[in-house]
Image (cartoon, rainbow, N blue to C red):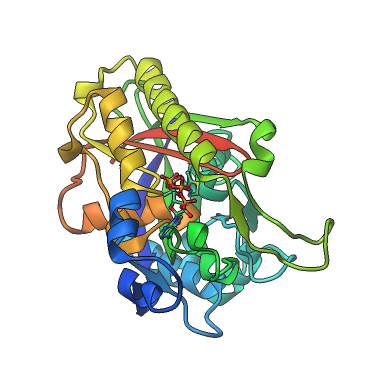
Amino acid sequence: MRRARIIGWGRYLPEAVVSNDDLSARIDTSDAWIRQRTGIRQRHVAAEGQLTSDLATAAAAQAIESAGLTVDDVDAIVLATSTPDNTYPATAARVQAKLGMTRGFAFDIAAVCSGFIFGLTMADSLIRTGQAGRVLVIGAETNSRILDWTDRGTCVLFGDGAGAVLLQGETGTGTTADHGLLTCHIYTDGRGYDALKVDGGPSSSPLVGHVRMDGKEVFKHAVQNMADSALTAIAASGLTPEEIDWIVPHQANQRIIDAIGKRLELPMERFVSTVADHANTSAASIPLALTEAIGDGRIRPGDLVLMQAMGAGFTWGSVLARL
Ligand code: ACO
């Protein structure tokens, strides 16, 4: 059985860090409120002129290098982003050019905070059907460009960054002992369209728009859908929650992560959380958390990792992988 195995990983966070206190100096908020409601302490913000493609290219180059390969070994780029450099072409095309890659194909995915999970699922399909041997999946965002910095209900929640993994097709036995992606489940329910959206776009207005959110509605769906898709992955694999080594959830809010832990009846020690330092980096949040835990030695080769996300759309889903 063909499996898509993660063989390389990379990340990039912009240099500038904005603390909660920095925000309190600009808008009516406080470090205490933000920490208590979200667990967020700070966020990274891209420099002027630094684009989503720059962040994505840095993370992707590191992923290729960590696998001991070159761009000539990559067949495809799947870039998950809600903050593309331009309306078109796909930012993935620009990343391809910036990497110096002159073969294969590259495209963007718009599934917002679930983008990395949707991207892994696309890469899994491309690899398993033989369309591509090696696929880069990148999540990259410059959320700071679409925030209304006067809206304290949203601007405190997000940050910029990028994370990437390189997947390679390998032959497995078809059991959960295989390395690689073991299950992929993705979902969309467009009835949630207006609960979280950017209120502009090429077809509806001449402007890009800003993030608007019904926080309570999003919170409710985030807990329910992320927990459900985690349980679906566990059931589909025939494993028990106790057999999962690490949970790497979308990093939106520590309270959402805590609530998922309760639903799965798993201790917080099994969860990777970077929301305090990165805030919500949308499509970049899972690969940033994953690469942090691989980098500091928590996640080791052979570990079973369950990733799950929920985002605007609503979109949600999960991927279970053995490193
Ligand atoms: N600082 C201080 N006060 C604030 C701030 C702020 N940054 N933001 C809102 N408030 C105030 C409100 O104005 C309100 O005041 P009022 O009672 O005088 O009207 C009060 O705090 C309570 O506001 P609520 O919106 O009811 O606060 P809530 O407890 O729902 O927390 C939050 C808000 C943190 C946004 C929460 O709803 C949440 O986490 N939702 C999930 C949203 C999320 O994570 N979205 C990310 C994208 S989706 C995803 O990634 C899954």
Of the pair 280 and 182, the residue shown nearer to us: 280
**Above or below, 242 relative to 49:** above
Residue extending farthest to the front is 28
**Above or below, 183 relative to 147:** above
Residue drawn at the location 61% of the way across and 69% of the way down: 102
Residue drawn at the location 53% of the way across and 65% of the way down: 143
The answer, for residue 124, to whether it is visible in the render is no
Of the pair 227 and 287, the residue shown nearer to us: 227
**Above or below, 61 relative to 25:** above
Residue drawn at the location 71% of the way across and 57% of the way down: 199
Splitting the image into 4 quarters, where does residue 233 fall?
top left
Q: With 44 as the anchor, is 244 left or right in this view?
A: left
Splitting the image into 4 quarters, where does residue 269 fall?
top left
Q: With 117 as the anchor, is 37 left or right in this view?
A: left
The answer, for residue 8, to whether it is visible in the render is yes
**Above or below, 314 relative to 25:** above
| Count of numbered circles on the image | 0
**Where residue 243 sits in the image (x, y, percent)?**
20, 24
- Quadrant containing the C terminus in the rendered view: top left
Of the pair 10 and 200, the residue shown nearer to us: 200
**Where residue 45 sits in the image (x, y, percent)?**
43, 74
- Quadrant containing the N terminus in the rendered view: top left
**Where residue 47 sits in the image (x, y, percent)?**
47, 82
**Where residue 294 sits in the image (x, y, percent)?**
23, 53
